Image (spheres, rainbow, N blue to C red):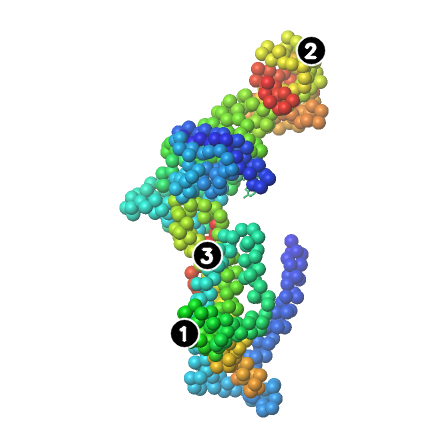
Amino acid sequence: MLEIINLSKAYKANQVLKDTNITVNNGEMVALLGPSGSGKTTILRIVAGFIEANGGDVRIDGESILNYEAHKRNIGVVFQNYALFPHMTVQQNVEFGLKMHKVPAAERKVRVEEALKVVDMLDYAGRYPNQLSGGQQQRVAIARVVAIRAKLMLLDEPLSNLDAKLRRQVRVEIKELQRKLGITTVIVTHDQEEAMTLGDRIAILNEGRIQQIGTPMELYDRPVNQFVAGFLGTPSINFFDMTVAGGNWTIAGRPVDREWAPEEKRGLEDGTYALGVRPENLELAPEEEEGFTMPVEVSLVENLGAETLIYFFTGQRQNCCRMPQSLYLEVGSRINLRFTFSKCSVFDRNGLRV
Amino acid sequence: MKKSVNKANALLIPLTLVFVLLFIIPFFVLFYYSFLTRSSGQVVPSTPYTVSSYLRFFEDSYYPRVVGRTLWLSLLTAGICVVLGYPVAYYITKARGYWKTVLMVVVILPLVSGVITQTLGLYGMLTSYGPVNNFLMWAGILKEPVEFLGTTTGVVIGLTQGFLPYMILTVMNAIQAIPDNVLEAADNLGANGVQRFFLITLPLSKTGVAAGFVLVFGCCLNSYTTPLLLGRGKISVIGTAIYQQAMELYNWPFASAIAMILIALVLVVFALGNTLPGVGGRKKAVSG
Ligand SMILES: Nc1ncnc2c1ncn2[C@@H]1O[C@H](COP(=O)(O)OP(=O)(O)O)[C@@H](O)[C@H]1O
Ligand SMILES: [Mg+2]
């Protein structure tokens, strides 16, 4: 439905977007995830028509929209700071877009009510934006978009101004709302948890380049590069230095017997690699065990009741292991860890998955 | 915590002193003088106390008419400044880079060049055979030169010229305070440029317009040099009347009484200005 094709954008010498490609299917919610400054807002602003791209194309249903002015695109944007009109009531804010689209008064009334009902703000129709909480302002911002029946909704970090508790609640609401309305949506966020829960698919952006697009689980289990692997998941993935010499593996300085290495990866060329292991793919193992294990010294324990996070060092690097039970361990005690090799990712020197 | 508050207060001391020395004390001196009696041949008036200066003000229609004229000139000037100043302010706000700096300098320059210089410059421009008249005749708009000097028109032109920058700066401030996102939201919801201006920009900057209006109006009420020079002494306003009484006739009690009435007027104007929607207490939504 929405196609972003080879989009590029530079501010003077600062190349903000480089050949960005994203396709969003009808009714789908795509989370655009990336660190601050990676160009997420820039993409949104180009699609909405607030700024011009230097190259590439943006198409909706196959037709390029770049030649349309912003006010003719019928794309609804929910801004990071909501951008409500401060001199208008909630009702007038929502009605504004309908007036601009020359909807007759009677129908306007119906549609404003409908939109306010959807976001559960009907009781606040007469209030001014500065009499509303952040969460309520945000719902009004969404209602504005719902009312004009935009084909496409773009949300720029809609949860970042809310406190942690409200954020979870609104996250669920946005997801339900989007499903109910079936509106094609791009939601920008720098929070990986938000992206994982909201996105039907996630597009990961770094330094103006799309790193990977896919369902949350595809990205989580099979990250194409070290950046994606490190960006998704909390606590984040552990990277262990790995060398392969003459077919023999060494992980964090410990040799791995030839037959213990995972079968599909035995053909690795000689060289140095990074082995990515998620905290839940490390397990406690008895001291004397068949296969590869790693003895470590516990540096920190976080018992969260349902699970326990155990931290340890390899060299200067802190790693984490997640046990799905409540465990009591002394700091400084020695444990033995087993790797679930089938779920590990191996990255080459350039950080690419092999 | 407490200490830092005290420090902040300490920083205000110099300003407070200046304010007290230059404004509060003279105000009370004038207030006191206005109830004294003029003593012939001396600047400083003496007792007995009397309200005769105030009574004299309202004795015949001369001084009330001076006040009326002053109010009218001030209102007219403030109105003209809104009409001329808003588009300029809007344009400068939207300008970018070097061009914007140039425009800002052009607006601010008159403020630092002094009233006398400007007024004399205008004086030269507005004489019967000065550039303005010559141009208007050349352009065929006028057949005969118009007398600007010594007329209300000349004074209003002078006042407008002098106080327009205040209007422009105040309005610019208000337009600049509108978040870009709010304007983009209007675009996004389907408003074209004209709709966006009249439905969003203008309503959200009307506070600045009102503030600029009150500011220019207040400045005009107080003005003295411009009416004196461009009015050629024929256009009597409150400012020139005070000057005449104090510096030419040495009637300080009467001059002080007129000054008190002027101050009262200014206060009333500002108080009224504060009750305008969206100006003073920000009763309604103005936040983002
Ligand atoms: N108007 C602008 N002028 C110059 N540089 C800009 C402008 N807007 C954004 N940038 C730059 O573009 C980069 C990406 O910005 P942005 O898209 O806002 O990132 P994100 O939304 O992912 O945090 C940043 O390096 C930022 O400094
Ligand atoms: Mg951003």
Task: Give neighbour class at mark 1: few <14, some 14-19, many 20+ (Cα, 10 Å).
Answer: few
Badges 1 and 3, same chain? yes
Whether residue B274 is visible here, answered yes or no, is no
Point 47% across, 84% down: residue: B57
Point 46% across, 72% down: residue: B133
State which image quarter holds ligand 1: top right
> Foreground: A205 or B256?
A205
Residue B147 placed where, x, y %? 45, 77
Mark linked to residue B143: 1
- Decide: is A190 above or below A283: below
Q: Give the chain of mark 1.
A: B
Mark linked to residue A322: none
- Decide: is B147 above or below B43: above
Badges 2 and 1, same chain? no
> Foreground: A184 or B110?
B110
Compared across the picture, whether A345 is left or right of A294 comes to: left
Residue type at tag 2: Gly
Give the structural element (helix, strand or loop) at label 2: loop
Q: Nearer the viewer, mark 2 or mark 1?
A: 1
Whether residue B235 is visible here, answered yes or no, is yes
- Label whose residue precedes the other's in the sequence (1 or 3): 1
| Residue that extends furthest to the top in the rendered view of this protein | A259
Residue B240 placed where, x, y %? 52, 79
| Residue that extends furthest to the left in the rendered view of this protein | A106
Residue type at tag 3: Ser
Find disc 2 in the rendering and name its residue: A246
Compared across the picture, whether B282 is left or right of B121 comes to: left
For marks 2 and 1, give the CA distance: 105 Å
Mark linked to residue B205: 3
Give the structural element (helix, strand or loop) at label 1: loop
